[in-house]
Each structure stands twice: as structure tokens, then as C-alpha cells.
Amino acid sequence: MRKKIQRVYIAHKKEFRFLLAGMVNTCVGLATYPLLYLVLEPVGVGYIAVLVIAQVVCITFSFWTNKYFVFKSKGDLRSEYVKFFSFHGLYFLINLIALPALVGLIQLNPMIAQTIFSIFIIVTSYFWHNAVTFKTPKDALR
């Protein structure tokens, strides 16, 4: 059994690193919005402004973990960050519409609504970053 696990790990190292980084990024992401909301909302910062701040923090943190831990990329920092942010930026724009709809129309708590929305980002991010953001010429040959 141990040898099977080792073979699977060796064959899918990047995917395992992505899952591990994803767990860390998810914890950071899921904690950042509620913590910022709890700190900033009482002083008059609205939930959308909190979302903007949280997104910048989380996208940047996630970029670093993906670039250096998951994909071990040696590519151009600026180019990769633009590609990374393009993916998350698009979700962010959708999020700016979805969060007020979930809060206002469905009357979900902003923290719960944001948690639900985050799940969609998690599911699709590996494929984007593997195929676009951190794609290397070596990956293109596969």
C-alpha cells in the first residue's frame, strides 16, 4: 500500500502541492474576508470595500504560493502575475455582482455568501494556472 501511495505521489507531485497550497490559500482566503469584515465594518467600511481589500491580499498571497511552491516557476514575475490576476480578477468582477445579489436578494449573511462564492474559484483555478499562468515550454510538449 505504501509503495502505491508513493507511486501516485511521484506521478502527481504538482497536484499534491496544489492541494496543499490550496488548503493554505483557502484558509487564508476564508479567514481574511470575515476577519477584515469584523474589524472594518464597525468603523464604517462597507462589505464591498472589505471585499476589495480582502481580494488584493488573497490574490497576492495565492500567487506567491502557486508560483514558488506549486508550479516552482522561474518565469517572468510580472507576466505571470498579470495572468494570475486576470483569472482572479474576472472572478472578482463577477463577485462584485454576486455578493450584493446574494446579500440583498437572497439575504445571506455576507460572510456565508462570500464563502460559497469562494468555492467556485477553488474548483477552477488549478486548470487555469496549469494551462495558462505557469505553463512552461516543457508543459507544451506533453
Image (cartoon, helix red, strand yellow):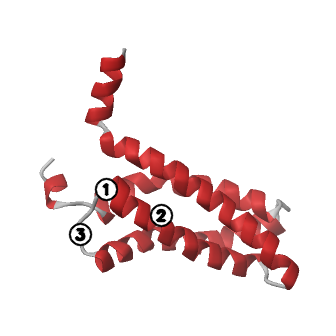
Asked if labels 2 and 3 touch by Cβ distance under 8 angstroms, the answer is no
User: Which residue is the site of mark 1?
Assistant: 71
Whether 99 is drawn above or below 126: the answer is below
User: Which residue is the site of mark 2?
Assistant: 62
Q: How many numbered tags mark residues here?
A: 3
Give the alpha-carbon distance from disc 3 to disc 2, as whole Å.
16 Å
Residue 36: x percent and y percent?
A: 73, 72
Q: Earlier in the sequence, mark 3 or mark 2?
A: 2
Give the left or right position of residue 59, taking residue 78 as reference: right
Q: Secondary structure at mark 1?
A: loop
- State the residue in front, 128 or 79: 79
Residue 89: x percent and y percent?
A: 50, 74
State the residue at coordinates (74%, 66%): 35
Residue 96: x percent and y percent?
A: 65, 74
Q: Earlier in the sequence, mark 2 or mark 1?
A: 2
- State the residue in front, 94 or 18: 18
User: Which residue is the site of mark 3?
Assistant: 75
Where does the N terminus fall, quadrant-wise?
Answer: top left
Give the alpha-carbon distance from disc 1 to disc 3, as whole Å.
10 Å
State the residue at coordinates (35%, 24%): 5
Q: Amino acid at mark 1?
A: Phe
Asked if labels 3 and 1 touch by Cβ distance under 8 angstroms, the answer is no
Residue 11: x percent and y percent?
A: 26, 34
**Most extreme residue toward the bottom, as rendered?**
44
Q: Amino acid at mark 2?
A: Ser
Whether 126 is drawn above or below 84: the answer is above
Q: Which class describes the residues within 10 Å of circle 1: few (<14), some (14-19), or many (20+)?
A: many
Q: Which image quadrant is residue 63 in?
A: bottom left
State the residue at coordinates (32%, 46%): 14
Q: Secondary structure at mark 3?
A: loop
Q: Amino acid at mark 3?
A: Gly
